[in-house]
Image (tube, rainbow, N blue to C red):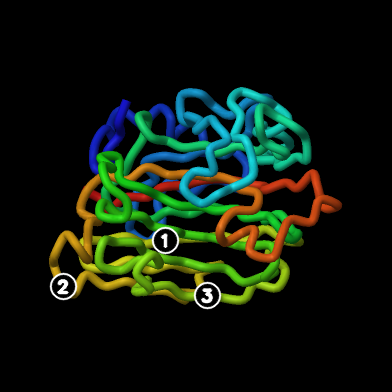
Amino acid sequence: MKNSIYKNIAASVLFLGMIAGCKNQTPLTKDGKTLVWSDEFNGKGLPDSTKWNYDVGGDGYGNNEAQFYTKNRLENARQENGNLIIEARKENWENSKYTSARLLTRGKHSWKYGTFEIRAKLPKGRGTWPAIWMMSENMKEWPDDGELDIMEHVGFNQGFIHATAHTKKYNHMINTQKTDTLVVKDASEKFHVYKMDWTPEKIDVYVDDQKYYTYINTEKTYDAWPFDQPFFMILNLAVGGDWGGQKGIDDSIFPQKFYIDYVRVYAPKQ
């Protein structure tokens, strides 16, 4: 069931009270905004099915990725010691040589504007391609309906964190993409907070409160700004692909783990 960032706050009171005492003392308000959705991954076993769906398959997902994304398989996605772990493994599955997982909130929760915080520790090694990103709940055509990349990292370029807003007018397929990069040398050794502030006027992306990317709604057209509609979140760990596999895949590194400590979504007070 969809969950707009500006709706159902009253229905979330019980939920917010429950998580208030969880790890890290989850703040219910921050910078004048109210926590409207969170997963602290304090459970055990599979990810919470009330919050996450899976993409399943090994068709490359438009990027010639090498993994098969599985569903409800602990080896590839599980809650453990207060974290979500997405694990890429070197193993034959269907017609693929690797397995991994791609979790998404589509059909369960989506948001229009807000602050999104994800605390994570990244995998390491040539061929890994973890991402934290968002797409339109009403996606009909990519990139026309938009994509927001809060964090991308390719293992052959260790420590370089990328943020991008994809639109019909600005995207890598026509070499017009608007993106930026921040070097985080210990991204695979320590947890960092990857954050996006999204308003009707602009999108700012941060690592640990260091802002390094801004995309401004200057043109006021759908071709350049399709970001006035609900978007859902995706967490995934790809193997290889057009970008992640540009310098091949080092099979000696597997298994590799993508740790997510929490996902938190804040909305302006109403």
**Relative to residue 269, is residue 14 drawn left or right?**
right
- Residue at 58% of width from left, 29% of height from top? 47
* Closer to viewer: mark 3 or mark 1: 3
Q: Which numbered dot is residue 219?
A: 2
Residue 220, horizontal then vertical, whole percent: 13, 67
Give the class, few, some or many, for how many residues have Cα within 10 Å of label 3's Cα (few <14, many ≥20).
some
Q: Amino acid at mark 1?
A: Met
Give the class, few, some or many, for how many residues have Cα within 10 Å of label 1's Cα (few <14, many ≥20).
many
Residue found at the very far left of the displayed protein: 220
- Residue at 48% of width from left, 31% of height from top? 52
For label 3, the residue is: 181
Q: Amino acid at mark 2?
A: Glu
At numbered mark 3, what does the secondary structure look like: helix, strand or loop?
strand
Q: Which numbered dot is residue 196?
A: 1
- Residue at 32% of width from left, 25% of height from top? 1
**Relative to residue 132, is residue 105 drawn left or right?**
left
Pointer 1 with pointer 2, Cβ within 8 A: no
Q: Which numbered dot is residue 211?
A: none
Pointer 3 with pointer 1, Cβ within 8 A: no
Residue 6, horizontal then vertical, whole percent: 24, 43
- Residue at 70% of width from left, 67% of height from top? 156
Camera-nearest residue between 117 and 176: 176
Separation (CA) of disc 3 from disc 1: 14 Å
Q: Is residue 141 above or below residue 15?
A: below
Residue 126, quarter of picture:
bottom right
Separation (CA) of disc 1 from disc 2: 21 Å
Q: Earlier in the sequence, mark 1 or mark 2?
A: 1
Q: Is residue 251 above or below residue 163?
A: above
Q: Earlier in the sequence, mark 3 or mark 2?
A: 3
Camera-nearest residue between 149 and 18: 149
